[in-house]
Amino acid sequence: MTLRLFVCIVTLPILSLHSVFAAEVDLKGRFIEGGLVIGKTYPDNKISLDDVPLIVSKDGDFVFGFHRKAPDRQTLHVTLPDGSSHKQVLEISSRTYDVQRIDGLDEKWITPPSNVAKRIRADAAKVSAVRRSTQTTMYFGESWIWPAQGIISGVYGSRRVLNGKPRAPHYGIDISVTEGALVRAPASGTITLVEDLYYSGITVMIDHGMGIMSTMLHLQESLVKVGDQVSQGDVIARSGNTGRSSGAHLDWRINWLNHARLDPGLLVPLMQ
Ligand SMILES: [Zn+2]
């Protein structure tokens, strides 16, 4: 009798907590550094990841992702219209990252001359402003396509040593392509930036909605303009070798607002 009472008191609250969360929230994706997670809930619920409130679309979609060095655990909270709150702790797998050494780069890319410092700051501010706003419609799903075909010459997360000097990690996936090769939209969305930036050269950004955005770097030319709607597979640019680039390639990046940089390589199938 005593045992039975003990079991009831201890297990019931845990079970009911778990089942409320599971009944309200469905999650699909990779719980790994650089991973993207797509969630579904009732549209009148509120969702937050730790302290960050997430956008919930009118259909109840929400998304989030994990940075290169995400904490081992993050907590997802759902608040129902009655004010009750339920949570689920997410365990995030960590990864090991290689060191990539690139030598022979012009010194202007390693220690930029003082007269371009202002431009570099203005470039960063422009990109950051674009990353701050998004559409609350989800233009992507679980099937992404490669924006170009070629040998992978750089991966997400690697630590960079340029001309022997440690620099910021690499957040994109580099696809080795010939100059002028067509670049396609990996998922549908709206073009939000077309700029010639100091480090990334001719750069195009696509807002896929819900804070998920692709950036294509080092292009030869953009074939789209800000405000254009693109569908998955549409040609948006020609690849090139502009900015800090040591040969023709496409560098494809994905970010979740300004919160996290995600790994595009986790979203696409193995290259043919
Ligand atoms: Zn790159």
Image (cartoon, rainbow, N blue to C red):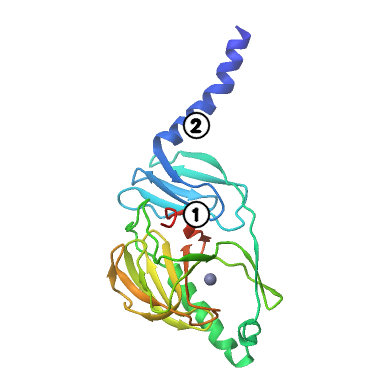
- In percent of width and height, residue 154 lies at 55, 66
Quadrant (top left, top right, bottom left, bottom right) of the C terminus: bottom left
Say whether residue 172 is visible.
no
Residue at point 45% right, 69% down? Answer: 131
Residue drawn at x 58%, y 11% is 4
Decide which of tag 1 and tag 2 comes sooner along the chain. Answer: 2
**Residue that badge 2 annotates:** 17
Examine the rendered structure and indicate whether residue 107 appears above or below residue 8.
below
**Label 1 sits on residue:** 65
Return the residue nearer the eye: 158 or 73: 158
User: From this viewpoint, which residue is outermost toward the top?
Assistant: 1
Which residue is rendered at x = 43% and y = 41% of the image? Answer: 83
Label 2 sits on a secondary structure element that is helix
Q: Residue at x 48, y 80 (%)?
A: 241
Residue flagged by tag 1: what amino acid is it? Gly
Q: Is residue 214 above or below residue 52?
A: below
- Cβ of mark 1 under 8 Å from ligand 1: the answer is no
**Front-most of 95 and 193?**
95
Q: Residues within 10 Å of mark 1 (few under 14, many from 20)?
A: many
- The residues bearing labels 1 and 2 have C-alpha atoms spaced at a distance of 24 Å
Nearer the observer, 126 or 163: 163
Q: Secondary structure at mark 1?
A: strand
Please tell me which residue lies in front, 236 or 129: 236
Q: Residue furthest right?
A: 164
Q: Amino acid at mark 2?
A: Leu
- The answer to whether residue 147 is seen in the rendering is yes
Q: Nearer the viewer, mark 1 or mark 2?
A: 1
Q: Left or right: 234 with respect to 260? A: left
Q: Quadrant of residue 90?
A: top right
